[in-house]
Amino acid sequence: MKTILLFYVLLQSALLTTCLYAKGNDNNKTTQLVHNCKQNMHQACVELGLLYLNGKGVKQDYQKAKDLFSTSCKSSYFPACHLLAGHYLNGLGVEKNFNLAKINYGIACDSKYGRACSMLGSLYEKGQGVEKDENKANELYANAIKYYSVACENGESMDCVLLGSAYLDGYNTVEKNNNKALAYFTKACDSDFSLGCFLLGDYYSSGYLIDEGIKKGSTKAFKYYAKACSLKNPYACSILEEMKKE
């Protein structure tokens, strides 16, 4: 269970540094996001908040990011509630507050946002802001898997990657199945989601899937790293350069 949770956190970090910025982070984009956010387009507010959170194209400002997430959360844009909870969980521009993290993860989870259910489950597993409750944690993790599956089928590539990672590690009611993991990563990559392509390259390169009869192969690894790089994943580009030197 802890392996998948760690992987989840790493994926969230990778998401913030790759998938949104692959679309561009120039001044024109920022200006457009500001305009759209003022028109109460809450996805634009969240994207703008992520720019401030990471200091991409704007000066890093945790408070501005938090305010944007908070406003969108109050308007029932539930991914914003998930991100707002992360501010309280990690103390980004605010004091750490596990109770407020729990409340905001709960709002998003109750609205079937799987990533929030996973993080809320982590709080119950660790007893952060709530009484430690393994059964409640397991229930929330199971809900996360269910919501990932629905979102993946509806074209949410990040959820396909999260679902693939669940099959890769074996996760509560999900039986370990590397072939299914590959299928979900491939689905994400086929939708031009750079993280899915990167993970395919990573696993073919490392031979992680050998036990399932999938041979270690630099040719396939190169192919997927190349696609991830073309989708502006900086980690894939770096690895690709190293592979070219071999």
Image (cartoon, rainbow, N blue to C red):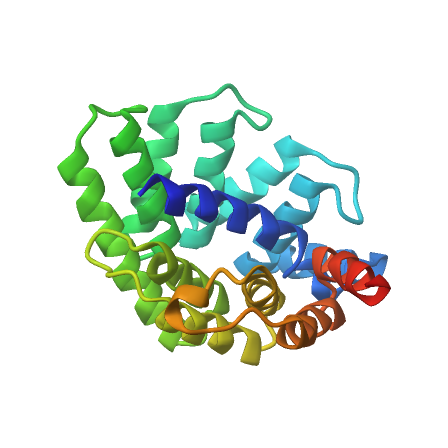
Image position of 218 with respect to 234: above or below: below
Q: Nearer the viewer, residue 165 or 217?
A: 217
Q: Nearer the viewer, residue 7 or 54?
A: 7
Tell me if residue 3 comes above or below residue 217 in the rendering: above
Q: Give the residue at x 45% y 53%.
A: 79
Q: Quadrant of residue 211?
A: bottom left
Residue 7 located left or right of residue 197? left
Give the quarter of the figure containing the N terminus. top left
In the rendered view, does 226 fall on the left or right side of 184? right
Task: Determine the residue positioned at 65% across, 36% down.
Answer: 64
The C terminus is located in which quarter? bottom right
Q: State whether residue 184 is above or below residue 105.
A: below
Q: Position of residue 13 (x, y in %)?
A: 58, 46
- Compared to residue 137, the image places residue 111 above or below, namely below
Looking at this view, name the residue that lies furthest to the left. Answer: 135
Q: Nearer the viewer, residue 51 or 170?
A: 170
User: Residue 32, located in which quarter of the rendered image?
Assistant: bottom right
Q: Position of residue 223 (x, y in %)?
A: 68, 77
Residue 22, percent across and down?
A: 71, 64
Q: Is residue 18 visible?
A: yes
Give the side of residue 227 with respect to residue 238, left or right. Answer: left
Name the residue at 25% across, 62% down: 146
- Residue at 31% x, 48% y is 117
Give how far across and how far down residue 124 sits, in percent.
Answer: 25, 32
User: In the rendered image, is residue 41 in sight?
Assistant: no
Outermost residue on the top side: it is 95
